[in-house]
Amino acid sequence: WTIKKSKTEFEKTIISNNGKRIAEVKSYYGFDFNDPTIDERIANCKLICAAPDMLEALLETDKDLCVLESTMLQIEATDTRAEGMTDLVKKWRERNQFAIKKATK
């Protein structure tokens, strides 16, 4: 991330990544340019910019967890040490699927 600040009639922060402009955060917080929320707003911009990659990673992780769930189900049938693992993996998948649904609906 490259973050550049400038001061005109407002404080402007431009966020870029690999030379591409990602976001611009403007602050009209008086004339002293000491906006106490600027760091949080920059973090929010970065999060929004990273969202597509995060969603892709979450979708891939869900596929992996699906395979793990099937595998653990087979292992639990023959090995008592794995008891409860399928339920744990199901909880992980439910958590992922909730986040995926929230991001795509």
Image (tube, helix red, strand yellow):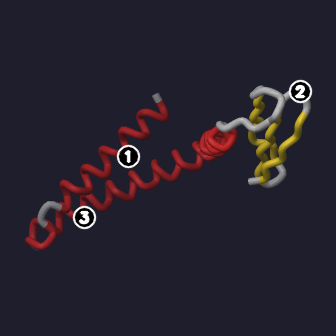
Q: Residue at x 75, y 42 (%)?
A: 22
Q: Which residue is mark 1?
A: 96
Q: Residue at x 77, y 31 (%)?
A: 26
The one of 91 and 38 positioned closer to us in this rendering: 38
The mark lying in front, picked from 3 and 2, is 2
Q: Which residue is mark 3?
A: 71
Image: 49 above or below 17: above
Q: Which residue is mark 2?
A: 9
- Mark 3, residues whose alpha carbon is within 10 Å: few (<14), some, or many (≥20)? few
Upstream in sequence: badge 3 or badge 1 = 3
Residue contact at pointers 2 and 1, CB within 8 angstroms: no
Q: Residue at x 77, y 36 (%)?
A: 24
Kind of residue at disc 1: Asn
**Spatial separation of the CA atoms under disc 3 and disc 2:** 60 Å
The mark lying in front, picked from 2 and 1, is 2
The location of residue 72, given as percent across then percent down, is 21, 64
Left or right placement of residue 47 versus residue 21 in this view:
left
**Spatial separation of the CA atoms under disc 3 and disc 1:** 19 Å
